[in-house]
Amino acid sequence: MTSGPVKWSLGLLLVWLAAVFAPTAVAHEIRPAFLQIREVEPNVYDFLWKTPAQGEMRLALNIILPTDCANSAVPRSTMVGGAVIERWRATCTGGLVAKPIEIENLSHTLTDAIVRYEPLEGAPKTLRVRPEDPFATVPAAQAWTDVAGTYFVLGLEHILLGFDHLMFVLALLLLVRDYKRLLGAITAFTVAHSLTLAGTTFGLIKLAPAPVEATIALSIMFVAVEIMRVRAGRASLTAAMPWLASFAFGLLHGFGFAGALREIGIPEDAAPLALLFFNLGVEAGQLTFIAAVLAIMFAWPRLAPVSLSTRLGDYAWRAPVYVIGVTAAFWFIERSVVVLGL
């Protein structure tokens, strides 16, 4: 029969191998584009169009306005972080409400687009445009549930594609094998990253994104080392009080979530609502991941041959720890290069 530690480790190894071989190369392309439309005079609009970029290459996404719109000037482009921002002004006869705005080439990508429409009078409106239907049509009225649903799905997608955040949770699952203490650790992580996510979103605290991303990788390395210490029979404060480390590193990971939310764009008048449901989406994704890991760990000893577990021996728990540690070390070096400007 498969032992407890082996059962945990083999299940976690399977989950992480699935993540390692997932198509991570598309992660940058999946970041949403953002279109802000602000009415400055009747039927006159300022446009801000932010598209994801890799280095100096941006996604070939273009805005095609209705035929009764005419640009007042040539769009101005600037590179900001990992995105290209274009600004221009246009006059649209009869306004933009109920008229389709096409996002050219969106259907050829994995990218969504968030459209923010701010009229002279009335409530702003937030739309989500998917590749399968690359048109945004501004409605005359919009329910708050539309904004909530949009940011909930964005939070869910962000955590499920945020392999560094998931790897930290995975390392916690490998370090803490008692369910009650694991629940406490996950709760502490949730509370902590919610605090820094909210504080950063509302401008109360601010950290540069590059050092944060490097330190997140370092936090994963730290937990991997703690796993090895515990397995070697040495004392570990992290293993004894996992909620403490989870809370401390959760504060750090919250800055990472906030950076993602800044890239997406957040409606100023509905910031609390968007923040709440983005965070709920993150939590839903995190719980989905944990449930999947626990399901695999439950199924493994019942489906896997006993002989396989016997042959693997210590490699059953060492392999996932090494994968986590080495991957995190690579990320730390890669992100530190960005911090140092090398």
Image (spheres, rainbow, N blue to C red):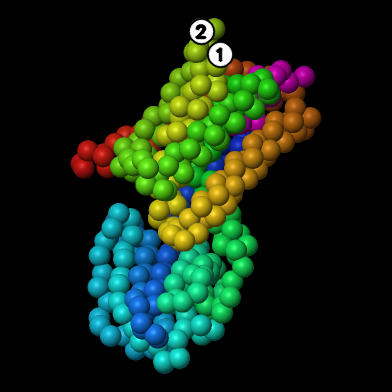
Given contact means CB atoms under 8 Å apart, are the residues at marks 1 and 2 in contact?
yes
Residue found at x 30% / y 77%: 88
Q: Amino acid at mark 1?
A: Ala
| Numbered disc in front, either 1 or 2 | 1
Give the spatial CA distance, label 1 vs label 2.
Answer: 8 Å
Residue 336 % position (x, y): 29, 36
Main secondary structure type of the part rendered in magenta: helix
Is 98 drawn above or below residue 31 in the view shown?
A: below
Is residue 271 visible in the rendered structure shown here? yes
Residue found at x 75% / y 23%: 306
Is 244 drawn above or below residue 45 in the view shown?
A: above
In magenta stretch: residue 114: no
Nearest to the observer: residue 84 or residue 150: 150
Is 143 drawn above or below residue 100 in the view shown?
A: above
In magenta stretch: residue 9: yes
- Residue behind mark 1: 240
Q: Quarter of the image holding residue 95? A: bottom left
Residue 82 % position (x, y): 33, 55
Q: Which mark is residue 235?
A: 2
Say which element carries label 2: loop
- N-terminal of the pair, mark 1 or mark 2, is 2
Image-based side of 274 in relation to 288, left or right: left
Nearest to the observer: residue 115 or residue 269: 269
* Magenta-colored span: 1-13
Residue found at x 42% / y 34%: 252
Nearest to the observer: residue 125 or residue 224: 125
User: Mark 1, residues whose alpha carbon is within 10 Å: few (<14), some, or many (≥20)?
Assistant: few
Is residue 174 visible in the rendered structure shown here? no
Residue 317 % position (x, y): 58, 22
Residue 286 % position (x, y): 60, 41
